[in-house]
């Protein structure tokens, strides 16, 4: 875990193990999204509102990803604010939510 400014503990993990080049690419992109969202949190002292996620991603990553809001399977990355944190998710290769191949990073701030 990384302890950021103000002593917040930053945590991230994948919901299920993933394999393959596309899965690795999605996991790397999610980690980059997570880092930018954590930076936003640390500067704004709040999580990004859900309705601002797509615009935020386009602005932050317009030159880095082919399509900054889509995973390697052409599904939009998902963002879910949670109490004192957020989740960033990909539906994975099967393109279905809530299945074993989903990739999920969770971040929470703690005092």
Image (spheres, rainbow, N blue to C red):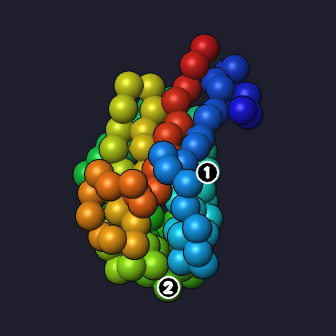
Label 2: how many residues lie within 10 Å, few (<14), some (14-19) or many (20+)? Answer: few
Q: Would you say 24 lies left or right of 55 here?
A: right
Q: In which quarter of the image is residue 20?
A: bottom right
76, above or below 45, in the image: below
Q: Which residue lies furthest to the bottom in this view?
A: 66
Is residue 40 visible to us here?
A: no
Camera-side residue of 91 and 38: 91
Report whether residue 1 is seen: yes
Query: Against 57, is 81 above or below?
Result: above
Mark 2 secondary-structure assignment:
loop
Label 1: element kind = helix
Q: Residue at x 54, y 70 (%)?
A: 23
Q: Where is residue 9 in the image (x, y as percent from the top left)?
A: 65, 26
Percent across and percent down for residue 58 are 43, 70
Instruction: Indicate whether 62 appears above or below 39.
Output: below
Q: Between disc 2 and disc 1, whose residue precedes?
A: 1
Give the percent coordinates (x, y) of residue 31.
59, 56
Q: Which residue lies furthest to the top in this view?
A: 111
The mark found on residue 35 in the picture is 1
Q: Is residue 75 left or right of residue 59?
A: left
Residue indicated by mark 2: 66
x 33%, y 71%: residue:
94
């Amino acid at each position: 875990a990384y302890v950021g400014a103000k002593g917040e503990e930053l945590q991230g993990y994948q919901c299920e193990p993933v394999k393959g080049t596309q899965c690795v690419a999605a996991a790397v992109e999610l980690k980059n999204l997570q880092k930018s969202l954590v930076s936003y949190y640390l500067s704004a002292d709040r999580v990004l509102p859900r309705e601002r996620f797509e615009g935020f991603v386009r602005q932050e990553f317009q030159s880095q990803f082919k399509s900054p809001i889509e995973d390697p399977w052409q599904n939009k990355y998902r963002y879910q604010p949670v109490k004192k944190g957020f989740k960033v998710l990909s539906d994975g290769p099967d393109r279905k939510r809530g299945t074993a191949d989903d990739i999920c990073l969770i971040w929470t701030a703690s005092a």
